[in-house]
Amino acid sequence: MGYRSLITFLLVCCMCVLVSGAKSQEAERLSTTASGKVELCLNCHRQELDRAHQRQALGCTPCHLGDPLTLDKERAHRGIILNPGELEHVDRTCGRPGCHANQSKWVKNSLMATNLGITSTLMGYWEEKGEPPAVDELMRSGRNSPALDYFRKLCGSCHLWFKRHEHQGFLGEKGGGCTACHLSDTPVGRDATGEKHSRITRWPPLENCVRCHNRSGRIGLSFQGMYESEGYGAPWEDGDFSSDQLDDGRFFKRLPPDVHHTKGMICADCHTQHETMGDGKRRHHWEQQVEVECSTCHGDPRLLASILAENGDKPPRSWPGRKTPALFIQKSGDGYCLKLKREEKCLPLEPPDPVNCLNKHHSRLSCQACHSTWVPQCYGCHVRYDKSRTQLDKISGKETKGLWQEFRSFMRYASPPLGVLGDESGKGKGQVVILVPG
C-alpha cells in the first residue's frame, strides 16, 4: 500500500470512528429551540417553566450560560451560573439585549439595591460627613466608619446585591438580585437528571417582600396582622412560649390585618414597577421613588375619570408624579374597580368620604393618620458596641472586629402618634403623618 493510500485509509477510519461516536451520542436527540438554535442542554433538562421562559423558546444558556453545543456534562456546565438574577451577572443574563435590559439598569440603581435610604440616615444620626455610599460602592471600596460598620453588620443583608444561599437559615433565603423578588418557592418539578428548577413569577409573592420588610417600620408584618412581641416568648399561651414565631426566631401576636390583605391583595398590586425597581436614577429616600398614594385609587372620582380619559389602556410614562396604576383601574357600573394583576378579580374602589376626607380643613391629613388602627411602636431603643468581639460583616462576608447589639425598653401596639412631615418651603405646611418609632 502506497503512502497516499495509507493516508486515505487512515482518514476513512477516523471518519468511521467519528460517525460511530456521534451515533453513540444519539445524534437523533439533537435539541433546538423554536428559533432553530442548537441547545443540547434540553436533552437532559426538560422542565417546562413559566409561559414567558418556555424551554423550547429560550433554552437554558441565555439565562444560565454554559456551553449548549456539547453532551458532555462537565463541558456543558463550564462557566454556568446557578442564579441568573444575581446583580453581578444580570447584564449577561436577565438584562441581555431582547430580554430585560432596561429593568437590569433600573434595579441596580434602585433603593432596594443601593440601600442609600439606610446609609444616608445612619450617617445623619452619627453626624458623619461625606456622601453616603451605596452598597455596590461599599463592596468595591471597603469604606467604613461607625455608622457604616453598624450598617454592614446589622442591616447589610436586605439589599439586592446580597447573594442568595451563601449563608445558613433565614439569612440564606434573602437577596439574589432579580430572583429576590421574582423567584417562587414552588418548584416546577424535577427533570430527568433529578434536578428541580424554581418557578419564575412576574408578580412577586408576599413572602418574598416580607423577607426584608419585617424590621424597623415592620410594614410587611403589620400588613398581615402580625405584631412582633416583646421577646422572650411573649405573648404567653397557657404559661408557655407563644406558638406564633417568625423564621428568624422572633415571636408575634396576631392582630387585625390591613384591609387590603383581607381582600386578597399583595404588595405588587399597588407598588408598581418603577416604584420598586426605580428609573435608573439613584435616590436617597423612599418618598423620592414612590408613585402610588391612597388617593391614586381612593381619590376624587373626577380624578380617576381624568386619568382613564388621559391614558386609555396605557399607563403614563412621566416621572415623578406618575398617576399609575391607571392601567389597572377600570370603570365598574357607577364607580371604579382595581383589576388585580395576577387573577381575574376586580375589587370595588370605595370613594373618599365627602365630609371627612374631602373636607378642606383636613387637607393636610394623610389617609393613614385617620385609617391606621394600630402600628408597632418600639420605645427605648439603644445600641451597644463591644470592640473586643467580632461579628459577621454582611457586605464583605467576613468576621471583623466589633459587635453591635440592639436593645429596647418596650413594644406597644396602639393608635399611632402623629407628626408633621417637613416640606421644602419651610413654612410648616407639611402633611400630618403617622410616626412609627423603632
Image (cartoon, helix red, strand yellow):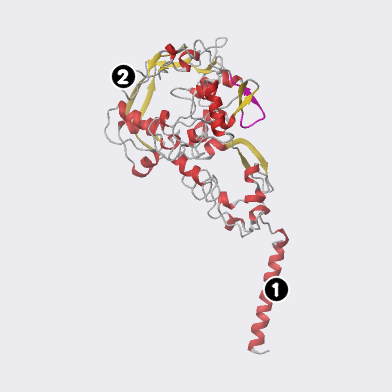
Mark 1 surroundings within 10 Å by alpha-carbon count, few (fewer than 14), some (14 through 19), many (20 or more): few
What span is in magenta?
340-349
Residue 150 percent location from the top left of the image? 35, 30
Residue 86 shows in the view: no
Say which mark, if any, is on residue 16.
1
**Image quadrant where residue 387 sits:** top left
* Foreground of the two, 376 or 246: 376
Relative side of 266 to 122, left or right: right
Q: Are marks 1 and 2 in contact (CB under 8 Å)?
A: no
Looking at the rendering, in which quadrant would you find the N terminus? Answer: bottom right
Mark 2 surroundings within 10 Å by alpha-carbon count, few (fewer than 14), some (14 through 19), many (20 or more): few
Amino acid type of the residue tagged 2 in the rendering = Lys
Q: What element carries label 2?
A: loop
* Foreground of the two, 213 or 366: 366
The alpha-carbon separation of the residues under discs 1 and 2 comes to 89 Å
Relative side of 244 to 36, left or right: left
Which residue is pictured at 56% across the width and 54% down the height?
66
Residue 411 percent location from the top left of the image? 44, 14
Mark 1 and mark 2 lie on one chain; the one further toward the N terminus is: 1
Q: Is residue 89 above or below residue 18?
A: above
Amino acid type of the residue tagged 1 in the rendering = Cys
Q: Is mark 1 on a helix, strand or loop?
A: helix
Residue 101 percent location from the top left of the image? 51, 47
Say which mark, if any, is on residue 176.
none
Number of numbered discs overlaid on the protein picture = 2
Q: Mark 2 points at which residue?
A: 427
Magenta highlight: main SS: loop
**Image quadrant where residue 400 sits:** top left
